[in-house]
Image (spheres, grey):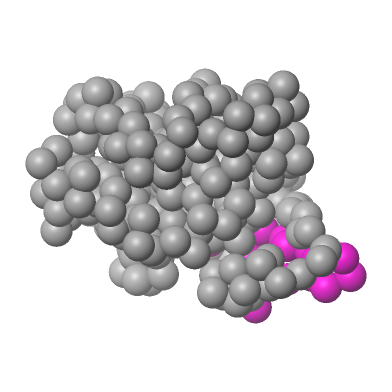
Amino acid sequence: MVSSVHVVTDSTADIPSHLVAELDITVLPCIIAFGNEVYCDGVDLSNAEFYDKLADSPVLPTTAHPPLGVFLETYERLCRGGDAVFSIHISRQLSGTMRTATMAASALPDLPIRVMDSGQLSMGLGWQAIIAARAAQRGLSLDEICEQAAEITGRARAAAALRSLWHVQRGGRIGKAAALLGTALRMRPLVQVLHGEVLPLENVRTWRKALEHLAGYIIAAGPSAELAVLHAANPESGEVLADLLADYFPRERILMGEAGATITTHLGLGAVGICAVLAS
């Protein structure tokens, strides 16, 4: 009989460290490379260190998902003693992480492992992992956690205000035409995660308007059960956005956090995002 379920995700989830520890979530680090300098996201390179390095480095970083061997070792270790694994990751349309996780699970057919595509990134993924981990702590079975997670996926939302579209276009996450349009007009672009892809939401002329429209995006979506505001080296704007949402969602319950190195590589410094799970 399975004694417990372990939740696994990757570092693109941007889950604050205190929740990772409290909920016993296993976070597999993505790889960040500045030329020949290679780091594990959140392990040997903190968010603050990455922000400073990104701002000063003449070499732009590249990212890679956790390797197959890390998945295999993690799944085998966590399944010892009859335990199970629920592994949920960044959208397969944005990364090879899901493919690698699925390969690892297929290589271990005798172990109770379920791999799920969140269809999201950052805390859009993070909330799904958190809710699954809470369910695991309540003693729900692997099947029950999978059913609950599948229902939550459709209610996850994520959007961000960017200083420019240059980083996200450079990483191949959005079309060149859209990036050029925002740059040419010197607009502040907003993007959203829709159907597992990062897509343009709108362009506005000032940063304040960008934050107001970002708040309006989630307010228009309807009531939220969970809400997080994240920033990439821009805590002041994060606080402004949270204040704009105070009448929509209890200010003290808004989870404030930082975008990790992997997400910041593709969104750029100064970005501010909102991630929610809509109420059922």
Q: Bounds of the magenta span?
A: 25-44
Determine the residue positioned at 14% across, 47% down: 246
Q: Is residue 78 left or right of residue 172?
A: left
Extreme-right residue of the structure: 36
One can see residue 193 in this view? no
Position above or below: 120 against 271? above
Determine the residue positioned at 54% across, 25% down: 200
Residue 178, percent across and down? Answer: 65, 24
Res 102 → quadrant: top right
Residue 222, percent across and down? Answer: 20, 25
Determine the residue positioned at 32% across, 28% down: 217
Viewer-side residue, 199 vs 40: 199
Viewer-side residue, 218 vs 30: 218
Residue 263, percent across and down? Answer: 58, 51
Q: Is residue 89 left or right of residue 219?
A: right
Determine the residue positioned at 10% across, 41% down: 247
28 is within the stretch colored magenta = yes
95 is within the stretch colored magenta = no
